[in-house]
Image (tube, rainbow, N blue to C red):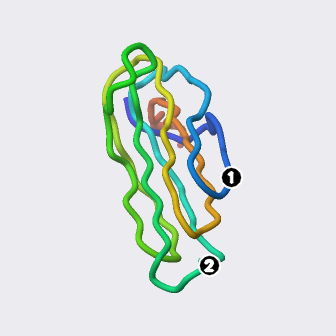
């Protein structure tokens, strides 16, 4: 099996701290896209995003630790389970999108 694409699970935008609703992972693998902008004081903006267990609330994956304005893409993984995100930020607007891989097979054609 190999990854053939990515499906969006959820997206959030805001300013300040947020705890998201829970979501179920079918694969335990994620791609997280994030962006920070509109920093209110230069050098004072922060964004931290952690995947937490939907059952216990413990941190499973520290996914983002951004200082200032920026953007990025990270691939992280754990196991199939319920998750939620804790998004902690100060002095920036942020957006976060979580995607999960779509698994498939490569088909080799032998037609002349």
Residue furthest out toward the bottom: 42
Horizontal and vertical percent for residue 36?
57, 68
Looking at the rendered image, the quarter that the N terminus falls into is: top left
The picture quadrant where one finds residue 65 is bottom left
Classify mark 1: helix, strand or loop.
strand
Residue at image position (52%, 77%) is 69
Residue at the location (59% across, 48% down)?
Answer: 97
Q: Residue at x 45, y 37 (%)?
A: 108
**Left or right of 30 on screen, residue 17:** right
| Nearer to the camera, 102 or 12 | 12
- Image coords of residue 72 (percent x, y): 47, 65
Q: Position of residue 83 (x, y in %)?
A: 47, 25
Q: Nearer the viewer, mark 1 or mark 2?
A: 2
- Residue pointed to by mark 1: 13
Q: Earlier in the sequence, mark 1 or mark 2?
A: 1
Camera-nearest residue between 108 and 16: 16
The residue that disc 2 covers is 40
Please determine whether, in this image, residue 35 is positioned above or below residue 13.
below
Residue 71 versus residue 31 in the image, above or below: below
Distance Cα–Cα, label 1 vs label 2:
16 Å
Disc 2 secondary structure class: loop
Residue 63 position (above or below residue 45): above
* Crowding at mark 2 (Cα within 10 Å: few <14, some 14-19, many 20+): few
């Amino acid at each position: 099996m190999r990854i053939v694409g990515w499906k969006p699970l959820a997206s959030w935008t805001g300013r300040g701290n947020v705890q998201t609703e829970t979501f179920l992972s079918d694969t335990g693998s994620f791609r997280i896209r994030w962006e920070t902008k509109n920093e209110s004081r230069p050098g004072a903006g922060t964004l931290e995003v952690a995947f937490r267990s939907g059952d216990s609330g413990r941190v499973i994956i520290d996914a983002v630790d951004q200082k200032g304005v920026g953007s990025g893409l990270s691939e992280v993984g754990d196991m199939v389970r319920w998750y939620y995100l804790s998004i902690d930020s100060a002095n920036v607007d942020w957006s976060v999108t979580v995607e999960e891989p779509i698994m498939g097979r490569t088909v080799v054609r032998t037609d002349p």
